[in-house]
């Protein structure tokens, strides 16, 4: 009788909860919350409690698949890897390394993303590597790097419970997106009387328990943020010492926000002027104040502008470099922070070392033996287009599902269907894998070792509790096997622990991180530059990473597509607590499926009456790009004129409707705003 | 105290198949099944986990297994109610009972911080009654409803209260039945989601307080259950977890008129 509890980190959001996976004789028998983990403290959300629900699904991929006569048929590992290696070599020889693209994965471990970055650069020789961070927090990485010199969450989660006196949450449905972070906010509010301000087009759960709730029109974030700053400056609530001593560019920023009177902001955004004033005072007068945001800020054509405005507001009030304050972007995936840290981005090596620097290039060349050129590679959005145009001849996708997660899915499908050679490495035959030429079966998170980096830069262990099914293998092993098949050296790792040793050697912010230390301490926050360094929960103390913090003068701009006579509603998209992203795992988990089995649209009762819903239950929603049918939830928790669809459901994919218009710098699509028409479905009329 | 427990467990492993207790490994502590030859220096007694849930799982999976369990007062109370409902086989379980510390009894508002089968430690004085109970009693009816409305508004429907509860073992759960609770809503419908569980806990809740500790929304769930336990004692003379020979009153037929009020009180 072999009884084990294996401590590991949750595969879903970026909070970093840990749980024990209970196994008896190698079979999963339960989940125990980890009471000793600093984040979850013995608590979990419904996804955490059911985190193993998909692992034994009969849909798991158990053998490599190769497309023959249009069908995917089982194949051996050697056959599949030889085919991939041969094709990639041929494409590279004929069309150059930049005709190959790679999507790494925020679901995979740091070690796997590091290897994928090494594979792209050292084996293929391209910087065409990116992942879904492009679709969530690319503006955070760009915007905060410009303002502070580091593009990550500035503070750590436990501070919310112990130190934060005011939370300003904008564009984050925290209790659904990051439930165990919301738990800290609730506790601070309950037990310490911390103030809570929520700014959101939807009256989320936290909005309902907030001290102040400001509903606003999607896409008018910059106007609202400038309005808050206008009030703070005009009422003399700014932190002059902080501004004078630690920042630059204040006067230019001030000149712009002076134009944003609360009355003008009300006209643009719909936020009542008085409530805007109250919110500004609450945030400025209850330091330390934590600004918390997520996709509601970033998924816009003005995503970088929005992030810079958030940074402005925090600097204006001196809410940086102190415990309990900060600019806190909540990262959506278990390891999206880590995938960025590991260089799964087209412009940087691990640790955000620029590919454009010859010095950096040489550093990696020396250790790896070879690497790519100094030109920035393609982003996710650009890669999909390049596949459609034939410029990218081969695309290798590790554990991502762009066929549901990309904007304007009809366009994405047309592009990916044109792929000359598509390889997908995943645990299920996802919508993307169905289009592939070769499919490789990866291991689920409970079937491998490694580390994830949570949203607050917290590196924690992931541990193997069970064997992968059939011939499935850990993703790090697959990358090593493929690299070796292509004749590369430097991929002979015996374990993820050895990969972390190489990561620490090449990544200054991870230099002090090792499996030995994680085993002893449980976690380490980067930057952790040396083996005796305790890690850094709070960034920018005394000095910003770039020296002085930089204010940016930002003017409001309308979203790319506004409602009109043909498409009169504004569609915004987001997450439900009961599911995760493209649903490949959560929709195969019985306890989650029974909560929300299918897609729905949220609509205000006035709007339901306006379209003549008449008690009907299904509607057809169309945009200029596509059309879906789905159920309706009529609710007063959304503004009239705005509708909401969760994005988890491939058969009624919100992204069939969304707009692929992108932010000019961060290249993130505008998932949060597009114009749609909503009509009752005919079968309802009887 | 812990050394004494380790010594007793070492002795019992000669006659039993295994002993359920907590184990420290690396950075954390989790439930474990100690078998002969295991390193007992890893055995721990804190933080608490509902170990009878694991005993029950093992008894069902291995019909002949003979187990020991290192148990606090609340664990033993859980065992008593589970055994009555055929979730644990008393003939296949030895309890290595130990007393909680006075601080633990205070923190847990525990009326009986030690097991009947006490082998290790000295019984500390009982903890106080949760002060929120008295505050709640002082509220007029309408405000009591508002009290729960305010707290349940934070619920994120994790089912953690149910999942962690040693007495929640039904295979089909009414909290997941769409007839009673509309699925997929956050917070779940007020007050059915929580009151269904509260009603089902009558005569079962042994005040281990695991539910409250597992609650991400910090809902004072045990106030609800303390009130329920008080009514059970007043109306039915039943204290869950106190007496393994006492039949659970809600599991007997109505001809037996278990309600004291029905007998003319």
Image: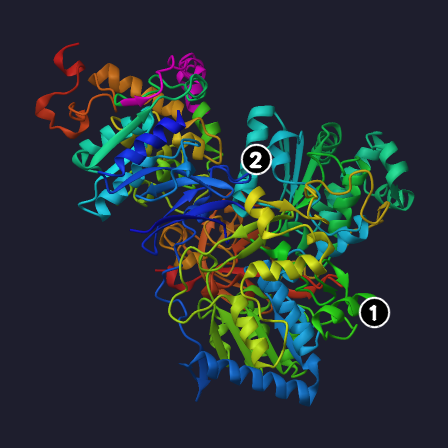
- Classify residue A343 by image quadrant: bottom right
| Residue at horizontal 36 percent and vertical 62 percent from the top | A57
Residue A122 against residue A50 in the figure, above or below: below
Mark 1 residue element: helix
Can you say whether B204 is above or below A292 in the image?
above
Please give left or right for residue A395 compared with residue A621 in the image: right
Q: Is residue A191 above or below residue A330?
A: above
| Label disc, if present, on residue A184 of the rendered structure | 2
N-term mark: 2 or 1: 2
**Crowding at label 1, few (<14), some or many (≥20) Cα neighbours within 10 Å?**
few
Chain ID at mark 1 = A
Asked if badges 2 and 1 are on one and the same chain, I answer yes
**Camera-nearest residue between A524 and A305:** A524
Q: Is residue A624 magenta?
A: no
Please report, as a chain letter, where disc 2 is located. Answer: A
* Viewer-closest of A240 and A324: A324
Pointer 1: what residue? A358
Instruction: Tell me where the magenta segment starts and ends, as one range.
Output: B118-146
Q: Nearer the viewer, residue B201 or A492?
A: A492
Instruction: Tell me, yes or no, if residue A422 can be seen here.
Output: yes
């Amino acid at each position: 009788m072999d009884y084990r509890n294996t401590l590991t980190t949750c595969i879903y959001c970026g909070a970093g909860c840990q749980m024990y996976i209970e196994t008896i004789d190698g079979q999963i028998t339960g989940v125990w919350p980890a009471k000793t983990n600093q984040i979850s403290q013995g608590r979990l959300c419904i996804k955490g409690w059911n985190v193993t629900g998909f692992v034994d699904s009969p849909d798991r991929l158990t053998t490599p698949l190769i497309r023959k006569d249009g069908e995917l048929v089982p194949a051996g590992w050697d056959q599949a890897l030889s085919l991939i290696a041969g094709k990639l070599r041929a494409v590279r020889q004929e069309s150059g390394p930049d005709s190959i693209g790679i999507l790494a994965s925020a679901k995979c471990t740091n070690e796997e993303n590091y290897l994928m970055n090494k594979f792209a650069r050292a084996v293929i020789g391209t910087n065409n590597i990116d992942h879904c961070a492009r679709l969530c927090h690319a503006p955070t990485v760009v915007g905060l790097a410009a303002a502070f010199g580091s593009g990550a969450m500035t503070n750590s989660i436990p501070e919310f419970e112990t130190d934060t006196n005011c939370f300003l949450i904008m564009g984050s449905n925290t209790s659904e997106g990051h439930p165990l972070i919301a738990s800290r906010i609730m506790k601070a509010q309950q037990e310490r009387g911390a103030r809570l301000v929520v700014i959101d087009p939807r009256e989320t759960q936290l909005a309902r328990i907030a001290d102040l709730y400001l509903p606003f029109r999607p896409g008018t974030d910059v106007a609202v943020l400038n309005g808050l700053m206008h009030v703070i400056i005009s009422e003399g609530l700014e932190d002059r010492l902080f501004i004078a001593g630690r920042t630059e560019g204040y006067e230019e920023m001030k000149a712009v926000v002076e134009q944003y009177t609360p009355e003008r902001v009300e006209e643009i955004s719909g936020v009542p002027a008085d409530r805007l004033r109250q919110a500004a005072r609450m945030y400025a007068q209850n330091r330390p104040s934590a600004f918390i945001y997520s996709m509601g800020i970033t998924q816009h054509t003005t995503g970088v502008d929005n992030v810079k405005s958030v940074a402005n507001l925090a600097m204006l009030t001196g809410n940086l470099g102190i415990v309990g304050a900060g600019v806190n972007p909540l990262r959506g995936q278990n390891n999206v922070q880590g995938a960025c840290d590991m260089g799964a981005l087209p412009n940087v090596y691990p640790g955000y070392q620029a590919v454009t620097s010859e010095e950096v290039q040489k550093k990696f060349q020396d250790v790896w033996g070879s690497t790519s050129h100094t030109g920035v590679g393609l982003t996710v959005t650009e890669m999909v287009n390049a596949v459609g145009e034939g410029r990218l001849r081969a695309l290798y996708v590790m554990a991502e599902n762009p066929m549901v997660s990309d904007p304007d899915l009809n366009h994405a499908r047309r592009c990916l269907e044109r792929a000359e050679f598509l390889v997908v490495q995943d645990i299920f035959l996802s919508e993307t894998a169905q289009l592939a030429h070769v499919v490789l079966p990866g291991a689920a998170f409970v079937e491998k070792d490694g580390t994830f980096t949570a949203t607050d830069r917290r590196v924690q262990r992931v541990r193997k509790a069970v064997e992968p099914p059939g011939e499935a293998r850990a993703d790090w092993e697959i990358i090593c096997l493929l690299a070796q098949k292509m004749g590369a050296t430097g991929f002979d790792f015996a374990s993820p622990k050895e990969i972390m040793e190489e990561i620490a050697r090449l990544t200054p912010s991870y230099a002090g991180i090792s499996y030995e230390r994680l085993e002893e301490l449980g976690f380490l926050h980067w930057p952790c530059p040396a083996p005796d360094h305790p890690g850094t929960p709070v960034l920018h103390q005394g000095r910003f990473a770039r020296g002085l913090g930089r204010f940016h003068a930002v003017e409001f701009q309308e979203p790319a597509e506004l409602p009109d006579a043909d498409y009169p509603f504004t569609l915004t998209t987001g997450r439900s607590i009961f599911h995760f992203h493209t649903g490949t795992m959560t929709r195969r988990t019985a306890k989650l499926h029974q909560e929300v089995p299918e897609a729905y649209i949220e609509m205000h009762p006035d709007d339901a009456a306006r379209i003549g819903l008449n008690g009907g239950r299904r509607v057809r929603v169309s945009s200029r790009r596509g059309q879906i049918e789905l159920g309706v939830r009529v609710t007063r928790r959304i503004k009239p004129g705005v509708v909401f669809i969760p994005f988890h459901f491939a058969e009624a994919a919100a992204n069939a409707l969304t707009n692929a218009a992108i932010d000019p710098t961060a290249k993130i699509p505008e998932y949060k705003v597009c114009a749609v028409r909503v009509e009752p479905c005919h079968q309802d009329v009887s | 105290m812990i050394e004494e427990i380790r010594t007793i467990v070492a002795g019992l492993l000669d006659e039993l198949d295994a002993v359920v207790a907590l184990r420290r490994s690396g950075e954390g502590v989790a439930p474990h099944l100690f078998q002969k030859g295991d390193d007992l220096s890893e055995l721990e007694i804190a933080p608490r986990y509902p170990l009878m849930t694991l005993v029950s799982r093992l008894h069902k999976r291995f019909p002949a297994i003979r187990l020991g369990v290192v148990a606090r007062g609340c664990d033993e109370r859980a065992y008593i109610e589970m055994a009555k409902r055929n979730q644990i086989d008393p003939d296949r379980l030895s309890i290595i009972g130990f007393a909680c510390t006075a601080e633990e009894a205070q923190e847990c508002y525990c009326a009986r911080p030690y097991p009947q089968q006490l082998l290790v430690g000295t019984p500390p004085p009982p903890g106080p009654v949760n002060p929120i109970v008295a505050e709640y009693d002082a509220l007029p009816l309408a405000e009591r409803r508002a009290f729960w409305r305010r707290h349940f508004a934070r619920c994120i429907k994790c089912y953690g209260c149910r999942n962690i509860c040693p007495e929640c073992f039904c295979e089909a759960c009414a909290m997941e039945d769409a007839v009673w609770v509309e699925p997929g809503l956050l917070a779940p419908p007020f007050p059915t989601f929580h009151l269904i569980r509260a009603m089902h806990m009558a005569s079962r809740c042994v005040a281990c307080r695991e539910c409250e500790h597992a609650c991400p929304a910090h809902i004072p769930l045990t106030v609800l259950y303390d009130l329920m336990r008080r009514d059970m004692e007043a109306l039915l003379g039943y204290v869950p977890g106190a007496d393994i020979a006492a039949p659970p009153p809600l599991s007997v037929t109505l001809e037996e008129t278990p309600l004291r009020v029905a007998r003319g009180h």
